[in-house]
Amino acid sequence: MTSETAVPTRTDIAQDLIGRVEAARRTWRAPAHVRQGATADDAQVTHHAVLADTQALRRLVTKYGWPGRSLVGEGGSEAALTIALQADHDPAFQKTLLTMLAEAVRRGDATTAQWAHLHDRCLVHSRPQEYGTQYWLRDGRIELHPVADPGGLDKRRADVGLPPHREQAALLEQHHLPAPGLAATASVGKAPVTNERPAA
């Protein structure tokens, strides 16, 4: 039985991770155009939610390592990745998680696509990303963070199991931009779109 088909050993942990990510739809998983117009109080609530979710993930990985599919199933592992992508306030922890995730990929307990997302997230604060998974909302448009070797982007994405860049960008625009006819937020600053896969 592979880790993809095995029943996860800790469904309780999976439910906690998934629940945290579901709850975050009202804070750090809200569409970018909504977050861009957040009040100071909203931003404070979001900040506390991110810290709490990061701490929960820290406790989990300290005990179990990366929560892969065998421990928490596909949904739980994806939720762990989503939380990891948001932990920008602790880049050292993100890099530790990236090492753990790489090991999980080697043993078949996580996907290369998951690793590519977190790898890019660790890169964008200091240099161009490799797989084109990280975006910003700027001036009402979805904008890709700088990418190393843009001409080879779709090949690199295919190599790690990601769809072509334009397909994913179109899905992001549907999720993160205001619906046609609705006014965009007046702010012209940047709001992060932390995960190239929009919330379901």
Image (cartoon, grey):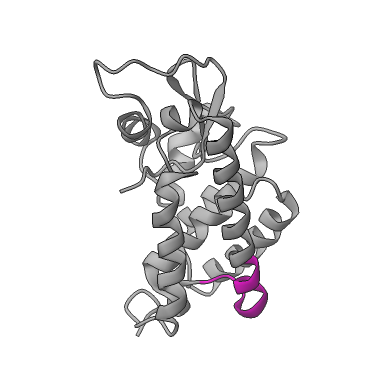
The vertical placement of 79 against 124, above or below, is below
Determine the residue positioned at 72% across, 35% down. Answer: 126
| Above or below, comparing residue 187 to residue 39 in the picture | above
Give the quadrant of residue 99. bottom right
Q: Main secondary structure of the magenta part?
A: helix
Residue 165, relative to residue 80: is it above or below?
above
Question: Could you say which quadrant of the image residue 59 lies in?
Answer: bottom right
Residue plotted at (50% across, 33% down):
152
Q: Nearer the viewer, residue 134 or 14?
A: 14
Using the image as rendered, state which of residue 37 and residue 2 is in the foreground. 37
| Region in magenta | 58-67
Q: Is residue 122 magenta?
A: no
Q: Could you say which is closer to the camera, residue 101 or residue 57?
A: 57
Image location of residue 186, percent across then percent down: 47, 14
Q: Where is residue 178 in the image (x, y as percent from the top left)?
A: 33, 24
Q: In this view, does 56 lie above or below 137?
A: below
Q: Which residue is drawn at 58% across and 64% down?
A: 101
- Residue placed farthest to the front in the image? 41
